[in-house]
Image (cartoon, rainbow, N blue to C red):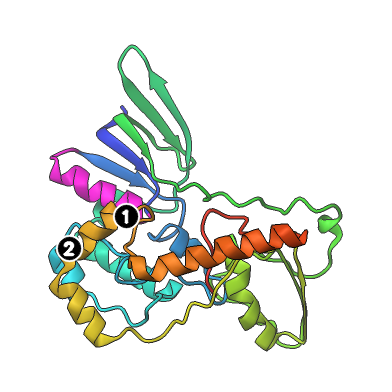
Amino acid sequence: MKQLYDVVVVGAGFAGLYMLFRLRGLGLSARVYEAGDGVGGTWYWNRYPGARCDVESMDYSYSFSDELQQEWHWTERYASQPEILRYINHVADRFDLCRDIQLSTRVTEAVFDEDTARWTIRTDRGDEVSAGFCVMATGCLSEPQLPPPFPGIEAFEGSWYHTGRWPHEGVDFTGQRVAVIGTGSSAIQSIPLIAKQAKHLTVFQRTPNYSIPAHNAPLDPEYERQVKASYIDFRQAARQSRIGFAVPVTETRPCRLALRSASANTRRAGNAAVSASASRSPIS
């Protein structure tokens, strides 16, 4: 007989864990299926050298619990992947979320029955459950293109890696000749560290990205104190912004004017302008 749930959630990253927390608060039964061996979503899978968030730590955190946001201390302005993974595991443990999460399980099929208005969800481990709602918390870029679509890659005798599926034990590039294909956010973060190890590094770039220095540093204790003292206002300003976190207007206006001026000058000069190829600019 099928196990019945009110809701099935696919994915145990930031969104999946928060969804489970809210569902419990509504008194609904829920089951979360996660393909990875641990929670964390993108921060579980992406372990390439230099991986870190490009949103400041005080913003990139849950706001549903004031106790949580007061007790957690970030160490850097922009948190690294290991620290973010520690944070999300702390959240899962603190709110006892893991008892409703099944790890190492990939959902293979979700079929909606119009007559019963219920979903039948099946997994690669033989689970078959029924739910009134099926919530996909898998993220928009959760499935990497593997193997990469390069002719001849099957004959390549060296080792190759994808930043979205980096070996958890890490990779030692000491004395190796390394090629990095692409210059998106993950490449911008990993290239400097790989270059420190590799004997020779070649970067293949199709489309340049617009990138600015992160100016990362240990988190200023006074800044942390100020934010935590007014977290309600801090979060409200973020929710009302167009980008998900508040930026003082005095800092953005000159930048926008400068970019517009540079763009206009470039067009007048007849040169090819270099622009961002992603929806947000990566920081290094």
User: Which comes before the other along the chain, label 1 or label 2?
Assistant: 2
Q: Quadrant of the C terminus?
A: bottom right
Tag on residue 233?
2
Local crowd size for mark 1, using a 10 Å CA cut-off: few (<14), some (14–19), many (≥20): few
Identified by mark 2, the residue type is Asp
Magenta: predominant secondary structure element?
helix
* x, y percent for residue 106: 47, 45
Tell me the residue at 34%/51% (across/down).
15
Query: Farthest residue in the top direction?
Result: 115
Tell me the residue at 36%/26% (across/down).
119
The residue nearer to you, when weighing 227 against 145, is 227
**Highlighted range, magenta:** 13-28
* x, y percent for residue 55: 40, 67
Q: Quadrant of residue 276?
A: bottom right
* x, y percent for residue 1: 31, 27
Q: Quadrant of residue 174?
A: bottom right
Residue 96: in sight, yes or no?
A: no
The residue nearer to you, when weighing 115 against 217, is 217
Tell me the residue at 48%/77% (across/down).
214
Would you say residue 189 sits in the magenta stretch?
no
- Find the distance from the CA under tag 1 to the CA under tag 2: 12 Å
Element carrying mark 1: loop
**Label 2 near label 1: C-beta < 8 Å?**
no
* x, y percent for residue 50: 54, 77
Which residue in the protein does label 1 denote? 241
Would you say residue 24 sits in the magenta stretch?
yes
Compared to residue 178, the image places residue 62 above or below, namely above
Element carrying mark 2: helix
